[in-house]
Structure formats: C-alpha cells, structure tokens
Amino acid sequence: MNSLPASAIACIISVTMKTFVLLSLFVAGALAGIEEDIWLSKQIRLDGGVEAEHGGRIVGGSAVAISQFPYQLSLRQNGNHICGASVISGNWALSAAHCTFPMPAISFRGGSASRTSGGVIFQAAQIINHPNYNSANLNNDVCVIRITTSFVGTNIAPIRLVGSGVNIGAGTNSVVSGWGLTSAGGSLAANLMAVNIPVVAQATCSNQWGANRITAAMICAGAPGRDSCNGDSGGPLVTGGQQFGVVSWGAVQCGGSLPGVYANVGNAGIRSFISQNTGVAGSANRLIGGTIYTVAQVINHPRFNEYTIEYDVSLLRVNLDFVGQFISAVTLPPATSGYAPGTRANVSGWGLQSVPGPLPMQLQWIDVPLISMDDCRNRWPSEWITPDMLCTDEIGRDTCNGDSGGPLVVNGYQMGVSSWGSSDCSGSLPAIYANTADPSVRSFIQENTGI
C-alpha cells in the first residue's frame, strides 16, 4: 500500500513566565479587581528593552471577530481570565505550562470575542504539562488540557498545528491573538484583539535577549509597537492557518525593542509531547496524534452471520462528537446504487503489508478495480458470495489482517466495508467487502443513525 497523508483521512461511520526578575510582578501597576490579581500571578514579564508607543490595542493590534479566530479560547481560573489557549482537537486544548503550573481548577470560554460573556464554558478534566517544562527559564512552556465534553459550538473550531521539525522562516508574517494588556500598565482587553507580527530569526533573538535565554524549544516574533502582553500567555501564534507558537514570555514593556518569545510548536520534543498525549484519530500514524474517542454503543447488523460473514457491518457510537483536524464524514451511497466492473476504488488501513509481517505505523492505501459478482463467484465457491457483498481483484494489491472494517471508496462514496479475503493477502483471490448500498445494509444504517 502507499502511505496516506493526514489530510486525506476521513472519519467514517464504519469504522484531532517570567520569574527571572521578581520585581517585574509589580511593574504593570496596581490593577483593580480580582481577575487582574489572578492573571498577574500567572503573567510575569522580564525587564528590558525600550518602551514603544502603544496603539491602545493588544499592543499595536485591533479588535477582531471570533469567527476569524474560532480556535481562540480564554483559559479561566475560578471564572476569571488568566491566559489564552487554542482548540487543537475535539476535546483537547493547547496552552502554556506556566498558566497551569501548579495546576489550578480551570475552565475555558470558547466561541465568543468577549472576555467576560457569551460563547460556551468548557470544564477541564485533565491538565498535562510538558514533562521537561522548566519554570525557571520557561523552556518547553506548553501544556495540553482535555475537557469533559467536546469543543462544539458556533465559532468554535480547531487550529491545525505545524508538523514536527517545521521551521518558520525569519520575516514570515504571523498573527497573535488574545485578551491581554492593551498597553504596559493598562488593563485586560474586553474584546478579542489580534496583531500581525514578523517572525524574528533565532540568532537575532538570542543576541537581543542574551544570557542563553533562547532555546530550540522557543521561537521569537514581534516588532516595536507590535507584541503580545500579560494576559495573552498560552494563546496561539499562527501563520498560513497553522499554529506554530504558544505565547510564553517577553519584555515588561510589551512592544518595546525586544521580540516576544513563544513556545515552538514545531520543535520535535514539543510536537511529540502533544501527539503522544492527545490521541490517535485524525492522524496518519497508528499510535500517535489525532484524538482518542471512547465507544459508547455498538450495534451489529441483526442478520450478521459469523460463519458465512454475511451482513458484516456494525455501527459504533462515540461519547463525543467527531470534531478535530483531518476528521470529517464520508458520504454513503443510496440504496441499490453501484458502479460498473473495472471502476477503480480506494481502500485504506493499517493492516499487514505482507504475511507474516508487522502492522505499519503509517496509514496505507491502494486503488483496486471492482469486479462483477459473477466473476467473484467463479473465483470463490459461489455460495460464499452473497448479494450483500462486493468484490475487488488485482494481483499484488489486496487488503489484509488489520484492514477489516475499513472503507472502500469510489468517487467520494463509501461503497464497502473491508470484510474478508485470502489468507496470503496477495490478490490471488478477490477481496470481499460488505456492500453499503445493499438495501438491508443501507436501511440498517439509516434506521440507527438517521444517515
């Protein structure tokens, strides 16, 4: 089989602090209200740099609509905004470790540009800080947070993460968003703000900050007058629709001569941490990435026969909605529809590539031709091939153990469910699939799912 990129995966019915200078706690000025006291305890910025002129926004930015940033979350402690975060899958968010270290009882507000109202409140069920997070130098300043339900609602959607090892070049235009200070010594923004900032070369950033503060797990961005600030920590830094940074730390002046510093999502150690802890649906890798879903209900076709393998289909309902990167539904065909023999179909899975052999790590796929029922019955004992089945055949191209239950797709329609075939998986005999267009199969699906 050929390796399949993550972007081609379909989810189917058959079956992603600044503690160096202690005095900097006070340089932001006396802020009124409980919320400011809470977030200030999480947001400390280093002294240094030249103060810039502030535009009264995120620091050089402007108010934006949540529909433009549906992945943006407000991370909250006791109902008060303390940091930003981003939706990265159906039930996982990404933020900065310094926002949750030590771990508080937190929640999120999503789907609203307002810091204090609207949208949906989501309760956190689990917080996982990067195991190598260093609170002294802010290295590996990331955490992933699982919620009790799923991120579902108007203007709530996940952001795609950059791949492991991806380097974002200096000068690349990016956008950072949040409800942080609109100026040094100011107040938290009432409405979501965003600002476009350029990526700063690692060497340049390191020279500007000095003292070996900038590590490979960090990336820098910003320009005089344009920056993130206190209250933005944990929020996303995005370019080209992909998140490559997490707001981490910066200069106390917010928008001065020193660039802001972000956790580098493309760093191999950070990317691996995210993948290993947030699941495996919506990923081309069999073991890591994507989202884990728990099955709540299994419904087998009432006429399934374990001896003849007739009506070999089942429905599985999960406890959350299928929402995440690279997770989408495939279309099922109308009842009694079909395609002519010779039509090429795609089949995918993580099954054996040879017998004997190991299961592949990467999702595989092949295209194979459909064959007529008569041809299939001529190759197998005729009584074994029933009307609820579908066959493909091509020497050297076959499904195998571990592919069962996977989709056979023609022109965007899932026409079959991988069922059984020859034990050598060589294509010497036709591969057999449950026919999703069979009237009994199609009505079974319709009656139980409404699809």
Image: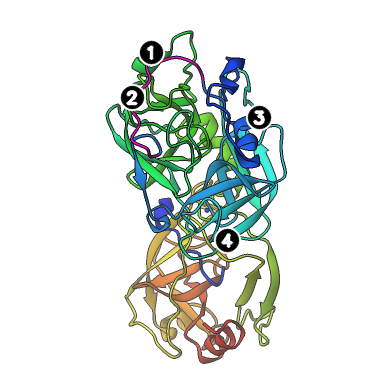
Say whether residue 3 is visible. Answer: no
**Given this view, does label 3 or label 4 mark the residue nearer the observer?**
4
The residue under label 2 is 200
Q: Is residue 49 magenta?
A: yes
Q: Residues within 10 Å of mark 4 (few under 14, many from 20)?
A: some
Q: CA distance from mark 3 to mark 4?
A: 30 Å
Q: Is residue 390 left or right of residue 367?
A: right
Q: Residue 208's mark?
A: 1
Closer-to-camera residue (411/211): 211
Q: Is residue 16 magenta?
A: no
Which secondary structure, mark 2? strand
In the image, residue 38 sits, relative to residue 212, either above or below, namely: below
Q: Amino acid at mark 1?
A: Gln
Q: Which residues are magenta?
A: 46-57
- The secondary structure making up most of the magenta span is loop
Residue 21: quarter of image: top right
